[in-house]
Image (tube, rainbow, N blue to C red):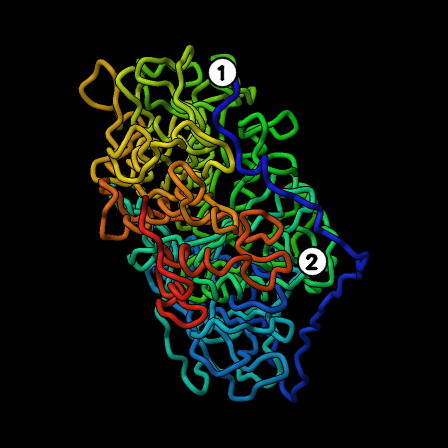
Amino acid sequence: MKPSFFSRSRLRPWQGRWMFRALLIGVLLLCSAGLALGTARSSHAQSAPAGLVLEYADANTSATTNTPRPHFEIVNNTSSSVALSSLTIRYWYTEDGSQSQQFWCDYAAVGCSNLSGSFVQMSAPTATADTYLQVSFSSAAGSIGPGGNSGEIQVRFNKSDWSNYDQTNDYSWSATQTSYAPWSQVTLYLNGQLVWGTEPGGASPTPTPTPSPTPTSVSTLTPTPGAGGGSTSGGWTTSGTKILAPNGSQFVISGINWYGFETPDYVAHGLWSYDISTILNLVKSYGYNTLRIPFSDQMWESDPVPQNDVGCPSCVGLHARDILAKIINYAGSIGLHVILDNHRSEAGESAEQSGLWYTSAYPESSWINDWVSVQRWVHGIPQTLGATDTVTVNYLASDGWPIVLGYDLRNEPHVEGTYPNQYASGAQWGSGDGIDPATNPNPNPFAPACVATSSCHDWRLAAERAADTLLGDAQAHGWSYPLIFVEGVSAYPTASGTQANGPYSSTWWGGSLQGVNGNSNNAGAPIVLNAGGNASSLGPAVNNQVVYSAHEYGPTLYPQSWFNSSTCYKSGCSSSSLVDVWTSNWAYIATPNGINPTWPGHSSYPWSNTGAQPYSSAPVWIGEFGTGNSASDLVSSGAGSQGQWFTDLINFIKSSYGGGGSGVAVSNLNWTYWALNGEDSYGLLNGQYNGLANPTKEYSFLCFIETGPLAVPAGSSSGQCGSTGPLPAPQ
């Protein structure tokens, strides 16, 4: 029996366009001596109050960055307690401009609310410092006992316009000091008297500088527990079907996939033609606000040096993670955001053939550990897997929000067929992995025995294990929680079937979320999250962080049964209504009260087993969909055609922002088109990566579902939405 679901990437027209040239050059090491200019007087610490030591670690080793990230720890080697409110820290640097600046506290053991930061212009600047950041403490911060320390103090700062600093000429910066150690070029003061470090030449050591510092209220991204212990302040979150930005406003993902890091090339494709900035400027100009970037576990752990063409001279000689960091940093600098996608284990094309999230070479523990490494890297902590990172990821975009929205835990979980033995060997939803769903459909995800042997098959529980580990790690560091994107599977038992014996309803790889609700014969299994856990207990429940994801394609990829002479758009128009197919597989999640998980034989679902709050809807993100560039790929040539599918899907997404017309009250659908890549038959860009493959696809279709300030404006002039014709009506 031929399976009726296939990955888009099986038909990806990879044509070996990566024509590399051997242009490997040595890495240029930028060093800063950080030497103070000589002065007639000494500004060294005096011996009288000796015993206080200021340790420093650099969390952003990039020579150029929009967000310096100095970290500190104060050590008390005296025999007396010292009140933190009597201490101040100074970090000396060149402002490289005259803009106002903002101070942030990411984490402090004494509490970010007990810190304040101020910026002071030096009255006698030097070659390596014209400004210092002063960190002060309130009385509520407490004291450091004899032999004790303050704990970590993780801060950062930026200019109001998010322009860059050149850290190579900053007195206090040391790119090589990435672990806490005493550093004489940051200074510590007790009641205004210098007690640690050496000031740069020309700076006044007096406790009240001229001009006086203007205190800046501390901004913090530290989580603050809310209802259910899962709400966070300063990060991305969700409410009903909406994704919310850190300021509480709605953010609709209107994005595009840029692949390559998951392949044996270990780098985003197209950099043979142009540099990172050129390609990302095109992305922004076409109205997209988000990039989905696939990677493999092999790329992450080995971190090789890809072969790079002269199109991206800034990439030559860099390791893969450093190139990815440069992409993220530039994206953030122009207001774009990023979703990182674990596409497969070994480097290769398409999804993992087995449909699972692990292989013998990369067991589940490696998959989860890699995600933890990714999260720490996103927060500016250099990683050492394969190689040591030299480019630090900037955390915030130019809009002041985290660049990285969150993590797409695994690309296209699936089974390879609809026979029971094929289903049993692939990725399932809600099967329980030995815990009977009829008895407990909402178990501790760490409890199944298969976890220890990396032999599990319930994707829903695996996603919860990975997410819980990430959320626990974020909580331990005091970071805001990321969004957790969970894709569907490819098959689910029908109401007359069972997990063990079928029959099964099938769709595209990653496209079935039927298991969230279940049916009359199979218990539902919504995603519930906790901050950490193990086989015996779970951390606090985390609510409002999950986004469900589905992939959706048309008949040129595979002629699914619903593509036929009766195919139509609106709900109820025929047994092959596209809206009904989409709603049954994934769109119902983004409808009012769409989530209502069943538990056959019981009156209500056991949400409280894991401490979760019930939820009745959630955001849906169409992580992949795409079509070719001929007229028939865009406009309907008849019932069941590729053009009909694409036109109708665009109209369905558009209807979710208001206007209706589909017959289903779906709302706030998010999306990322497959793909940006010019070598892909579905690509948005042409093969030269210097323009659109077909302007009609952008200006008569995709632009109509772009939202937010970056969306292409409507109009009839070249480059405006609708300039190549209006969006066709659904058919």
Which residue is nearer to you in this view: 567 or 610? 567
* Residue occupying image coordinates x 24% and y 24%: 605
Vertical placement of residue 273 versus 375, above or below:
below
State the residue in front, 54 or 708. Answer: 708
**Residue in the image at 43% along x and 55% along y:** 107
Residue 454: image x %, image y %?
55, 22
Residue 15, position in %: x, y?
69, 45
Task: Note whether 567 is above or below 120 in the view shown.
Answer: above
Q: Residue at x 53, y 78 (%)?
A: 95
Badge 1 amino acid: Ala
What is the secondary structure assignment of the residue under circle 2?
loop
**Height in image: 653 above or below 21?**
above
Q: Real-space Cα distance between discs 2 and 1?
A: 42 Å
Q: Amino acid at mark 2?
A: Trp
Q: Residues within 10 Å of mark 2 (few under 14, many from 20)?
A: many
Asked if one can make out residue 69 in the rendered structure from this viewpoint, the answer is no
Q: Earlier in the sequence, mark 2 or mark 1?
A: 2
In the picture, measured across the screen, residue 225 lies left or right of residue 397, that is left
What residue do we see at 71% from left, 68% from top?
Answer: 30
Per the rendering, the mark at residue 272 is: 2
- Checking the image for residue 531, the label placed there is none
User: Decide: marks 2, 1 in contact (CB < 8 A)?
Assistant: no
Q: Nearer the viewer, mark 2 or mark 1?
A: 2
- Residue 719 picture location, percent across and down: 45, 68
- Residue 485 visible in this rendered orientation of the protein: yes
Quarter occupied by residue 596: top left
Where is the C terminus found, in terms of image quarters? top left
**129, above or below 111, in the image:** below
**Residue 404 placement, left or right of 602:** right
Residue at far left of view: 603
Residue labelled with disc 1: 424
